[in-house]
Image (cartoon, helix red, strand yellow):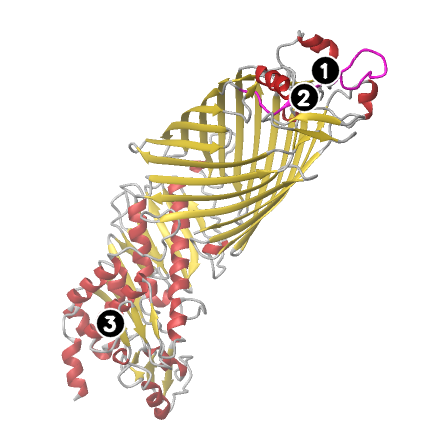
């Protein structure tokens, strides 16, 4: 009986129905292989950076949220929001002294003192910054793609806006990508208490009437100012082979307008022999003389950047880059950056090393002498004691550890340590006994989660 | 001995084997890395998956595309292997098999597979059943004469039967003790999946053949218009004893494995089990190879024919397909 039944079913032509069912099975794309970068979903990255310099200097906390919407695999919109809070003290540029020093706060509404031998830090430093940016990229056709973006940030005394665009050309089956980009930024600088007149003497209220001080203070102020920055870059990305990717970029950047740091000052040192030789020059009002810094009002920078990424047979990735920068302020810098991503199943460990070497700007001066100051009839037009413009070496060591839960979700923690040393003219007379170039060290930790 | 002195030996004319690196994440079973040889426009990629040697043959494809195609094929096959295997402890199949009667929500790809299994169950009038794997607990096809007791098979039959489970996309409820097994579909599906995806991602004019342990599919003849020549394992040899076959298009799949059987009192018991009674299908052929437009279809027709036992050839004739049967 069963056999008979079976014969019936066995000879039934099921081929067509089975073929239709098979088409239904194969006709729909696998959904499980969807990963980041797939159309129709937002990829979100969140991160929190905590930065801390030693000796109670700058402390910063920076949350970041970045979201990318993928439209069809090639067209992408990225939106990013960054908030910073910075607190702590920042070197003012003045030299330490054997005597206590008094400075006027940037607002003009008070002063602060620095003990003998201490590095003069401006501890009124405090800032919060909110930055937003949007970037859109899309193909034009098979061979070309473009991107456009806008950026805006706002902090208490500074507003920055920028727009950018780039065009990419693919060659040789996308093995070669040529990219040209242009960015235009306009910043508005509105320092606390107004922007100081460059190289004018910092008024100090000791031994003065309030009205006299106010008059002196306002004489050193100018209105707010602007800065424009034009950046252009040209890059080549080349796939060398399946494991190696190389990139060259040449960038040129031209800034003009108010490029001075309104909160940085220089000490004027008495260079005539006598009791105060090598100490702060004392003005006619009995106060030490400090002048506000002044930088050139244009800056032209050229940079060359070379990066190579190499994937080893075991999936580890080596990433090395070198940047050379030169500008018409006389600064040249070299940056070497090395990373090794060591993959271990679902997690990876990425040690990081960075070496930075910079030469000083032509107008960098650790201090001015009384002769250069020349009772206010200054022998020079530009000067800055900002350590960031001096001879400098920086070493950064760090590591990042990341864990991938699945294709979409990754948690990572990064910890870095920076040691920065400056060097230069050691001073003379009593100044020679001061540490004019204290080392800076900083550590930061970043926790990030993307999904 | 090639002459290197002229300095004209370019990468394109070299036929050295390249190893393709893939991350450990893409290779959960820790297979050896895929290897690519050939060139300048014809390539042979090899890797291992699903307990079979896997190969992709590429014609009219440049070196870079060939490397990418092989990397993709291995990644995708390993993904499917990991996904559908009943030997992996942390995939959806394992979750279903451990669910103890609790409903499990499955993803789209598993859902499609379950829909397909349901349709095959229906079209085979219950002979193709992805829940019949539990019968292997008492059937060990090791060439010996150790047959299980009828009591043992009867007891297990309570755990067999697609009709006993509840499948309402996307939720599957499997009674406690039952198991599902995609072993009868997974490899052929992987062949089709990889071929379809490579066809889409490679430039037009590329010719591809995907062969996973003798289950294979191609997108037409070679670029020259000639047939693909594919080596097949001895026990899967077709009508003659030649170890190669020619293919101009479509797919081939083979069911049966002459090494998996039991023999007692002169009766040979095939490893094809009838889920209706828990015993081997009588008079099933040693091996059946079917040609069809897709590998999944060819494989399913071969499986259906196996389940038809002595009626295998008759069944296949009714389906209007080319086939080769070894008795």
Are the residues tagged 3 and 1 within 8 Å (C-beta)? no
Instruction: Name the residue tied to disc 2.
Output: A204
Q: Is residue B112 above or below residue A129?
A: below
Q: Secondary structure at mark 1?
A: loop
Q: CA distance from mark 3 to mark 1?
A: 98 Å
Instruction: Name the residue tied to disc 3.
Output: B118
- Which chain does the numbered disc 1 sit on? A
Residue A388 makes an appearance in the image: yes
Which residue: 26% across, 75% down? B128
Place residue B297 in its image quadrant: bottom left
User: What numbered label is drawn on residue A285?
Assistant: 1
Q: Which residues are magenta?
A: A259-286
Is B68 in front, or is A434?
Answer: A434
User: What numbered label is drawn on residue A397?
Assistant: none
Q: Secondary structure at mark 3?
A: helix
Which residue: 35% across, 35% down? A137
């Amino acid at each position: 009986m069963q056999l008979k039944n079976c014969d019936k079913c066995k000879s039934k032509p099921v081929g067509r129905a089975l073929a239709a069912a098979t088409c239904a099975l194969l006709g729909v794309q696998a959904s499980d292989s969807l990963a980041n970068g797939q159309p129709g979903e937002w990829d979100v990255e969140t991160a929190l950076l905590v930065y801390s310099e030693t000796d109670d200097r700058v402390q910063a906390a920076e949350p970041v949220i970045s979201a990318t919407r993928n439209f069809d695999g090639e067209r992408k919109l990225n939106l990013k929001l960054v908030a910073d809070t910075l607190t702590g003290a920042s070197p003012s540029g003045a030299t330490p002294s054997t005597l206590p020093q008094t400075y006027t706060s940037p607002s003009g509404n008070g002063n602060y003192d620095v003990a003998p031998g201490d590095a003069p830090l401006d501890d009124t430093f405090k800032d919060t910054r909110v930055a937003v940016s949007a970037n859109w990229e899309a193909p034009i056709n098979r061979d070309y793609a473009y991107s456009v973006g806008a950026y805006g940030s706002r902090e208490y005394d500074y507003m920055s806006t920028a727009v950018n665009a780039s065009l990419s050309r693919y060659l040789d089956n996308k093995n070669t990508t040529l990219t040209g980009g242009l960015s235009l930024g306009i910043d508005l600088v509105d320092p606390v208490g107004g922007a100081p007149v460059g190289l004018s003497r910092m008024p100090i209220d000791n031994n003065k009437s309030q009205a006299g001080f106010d008059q002196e203070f306002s004489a050193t102020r100018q209105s707010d100012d602007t800065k424009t920055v034009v950046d252009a870059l040209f890059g080549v990305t080349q796939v060398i082979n399946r494991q190696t990717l190389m990139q060259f970029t040449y960038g040129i950047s031209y800034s003009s307008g108010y490029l001075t740091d309104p909160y940085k000052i220089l000490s004027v040192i008495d260079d005539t022999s006598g009791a105060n030789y090598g100490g702060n020059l004392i003005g006619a009002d009995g106060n030490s003389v400090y002048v506000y810094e002044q930088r050139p009002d244009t800056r032209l920078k050229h940079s060359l950047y070379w990066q190579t990424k190499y994937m080893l047979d075991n999936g580890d990735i080596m990433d090395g880059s070198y940047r050379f920068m030169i500008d018409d302020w006389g600064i040249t810098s070299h940056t070497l950056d090395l990373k090794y991503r060591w993959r271990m199943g679902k997690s990876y460990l990425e040690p990081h090393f960075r070496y930075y070497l910079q030469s000083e700007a032509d107008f960098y001066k650790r201090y001015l002498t009384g002769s250069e100051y020349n009772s206010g009839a200054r022998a020079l037009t530009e000067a800055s004691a900002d350590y960031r413009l001096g001879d400098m070496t920086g070493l950064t060591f760090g590591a990042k550890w990341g864990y991938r839960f699945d294709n979409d979700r990754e948690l990572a923690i990064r910890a870095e340590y920076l040691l920065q040393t400056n060097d230069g003219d050691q001073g003379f007379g009593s100044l020679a006994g001061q540490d004019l170039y204290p080392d800076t060290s900083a550590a930061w930790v970043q926790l990030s989660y993307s999904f | 001995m090639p002459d290197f002195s002229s300095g004209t030996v370019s990468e394109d004319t070299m036929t050295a084997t390249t190893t393709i690196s893939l991350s450990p994440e893409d290779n959960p079973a820790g297979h050896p890395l895929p290897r690519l040889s050939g060139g300048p426009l014809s390539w042979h990629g090899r890797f291992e998956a699903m307990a079979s040697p896997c190969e992709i043959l590429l014609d009219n494809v440049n070196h870079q595309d060939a490397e990418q195609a092989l990397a993709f094929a291995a990644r995708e096959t390993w993904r499917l292997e990991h996904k559908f295997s009943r030997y992996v402890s942390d995939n959806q199949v394992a979750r279903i098999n451990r669910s103890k009667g609790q409903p499990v929500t499955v993803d789209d790809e598993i859902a499609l597979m379950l829909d397909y299994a349901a349709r095959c169950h229906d079209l085979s009038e219950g002979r193709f059943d992805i829940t019949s794997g539990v019968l292997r607990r008492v059937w060990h096809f090791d060439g010996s004469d150790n047959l299980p007791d009828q009591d043992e098979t009867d007891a297990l039959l309570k755990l067999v039967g697609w009709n006993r489970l509840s499948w309402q996309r996307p939720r599957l409820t499997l009674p406690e003790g039952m198991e599902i097994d995609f072993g009868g579909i997974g490899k052929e599906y992987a062949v089709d999946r990889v071929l379809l995806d490579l066809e889409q991602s490679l430039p037009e004019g590329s010719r591809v053949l995907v062969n996973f342990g003798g289950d294979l599919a191609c997108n037409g003849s070679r670029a020259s218009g000639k047939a693909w020549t594919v080596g097949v394992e001895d026990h899967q040899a077709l009508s003659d004893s030649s170890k190669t076959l020619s293919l101009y298009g479509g797919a081939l799949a083979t069911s049966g494995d002459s090494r998996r059987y039991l023999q007692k009192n002169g009766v040979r018991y095939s490893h094809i089990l009838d889920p209706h009674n828990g015993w081997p299908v009588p008079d099933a052929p040693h091996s059946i190879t079917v040609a069809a437009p897709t590998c999944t279809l060819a494989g399913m027709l071969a499986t259906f024919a196996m389940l038809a036992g002595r009626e295998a050839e008759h069944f296949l004739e009714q389906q209007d397909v080319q086939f080769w049967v070894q008795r």
